[in-house]
Image: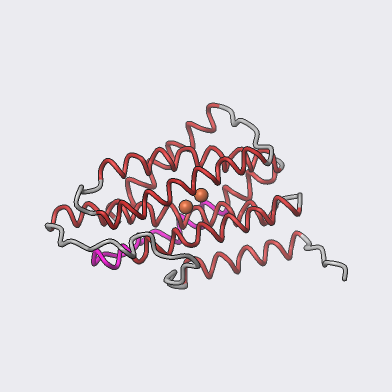
Amino acid sequence: MQERRLTPLDRLLAGINDALSTVAVPANRAAREYPAADIDDVELDARAKAHAAGLIRVNHAGEIAAQGLYQGHAAVARDEEVSAQMRQSAAEEFDHLAWCEQRLAELDDKPSKLNTLWYAGSFAIGAASGLFGDKWSLGFIRETERQVCEHLSSHLQGLPDEDARSRAIVAQMREEEQEHGEKAEAAGAAELPRPVKDLMRLTAKLMTGSAYRL
Ligand SMILES: [Fe+2]
Ligand SMILES: [Fe+2]
């Protein structure tokens, strides 16, 4: 049977559908096991708990942005294989989103109030970079994952020592973000120009700074 080719409009509509389900539907439906499932939850003091929740909220906002980026790229990717690969990565990122959401609830806290904004902005950036061609959108993904890994490493240092549950989640995410970056590299990612990387860092700083608080 011949597979139906998606028109750009089909993909855009699929992207909007993904957008609505990402920000509107609770993400407590990870396909894989919760990395903290076998780890005891210890009672953190108020300050440590608020700090851990702030960092997990930043990661949750980052995962919302990852959904936007991947789905934005997939909406405009020219190569069907690249498009399918991006949807696959977005599906894996969905577990990260669900895990962060679960951990935030365990810490009696809530996701960022600005999630719709993170999603919409990332979707637009993802689609825009994809319009330059697949090697650039792959380059964008590789650089994003590289920067995300740096963030996650700093979170592993900054999380309270006793918060083993959050640590287990962040450690597994870091491992998988690294794999996503390597996958994009293997698929032919171009090296982004320095000013673009700097701009990405600046945007990430703005996002992480506000998501920690709001
Ligand atoms: Fe992720
Ligand atoms: Fe990733």
User: As drawn, is 156 to the left or to the right of 186?
Assistant: left
Please tell me how many numbered marks the rendered image carries. 0
Most extreme residue toward the front, as rendered? 38
Residue that appears at 14% across and 53% down: 47
Most extreme residue toward the right, as rendered? 1
Position of the C terminus, as image quadrant, is bottom left
User: As drawn, is 197 to the left or to the right of 54?
Assistant: right
Q: Is the stretch drawn in magenta largely helix, strand or loop?
A: helix
Q: How is the image coloured?
A: secondary structure
Q: Is residue 72 above or below residue 148?
A: below
Q: Is residue 188 above or below residue 17?
A: above
Judging depth in this view, the residue of 147 and 167 nearest the camera is 167
Residue that appears at 63% across and 58% down: 87
Most extreme residue toward the left, as rendered? 45
Judging depth in this view, the residue of 30 and 119 nearest the camera is 30
Judging depth in this view, the residue of 128 and 136 nearest the camera is 136
User: As drawn, is 63 to the left or to the right of 16?
Assistant: left
Position of the N terminus, as image quadrant, is bottom right
Residue 68 is situated, as x and y percent measured from the top left of the image, at: 54, 56
Residue 46 is situated, as x and y percent measured from the top left of the image, at: 13, 58
Segment colored magenta: 103-123
Residue 136 is situated, as x and y percent measured from the top left of the image, at: 66, 38
Residue 192 is situated, as x and y percent measured from the top left of the image, at: 59, 31
Determine the image quadrant of residue 43: bottom left
Instruction: Check residue 71 for magenta coloring.
Output: no
Residue that appears at 59% across and 49% down: 126
Instruction: Check residue 106 for magenta coloring.
Output: yes
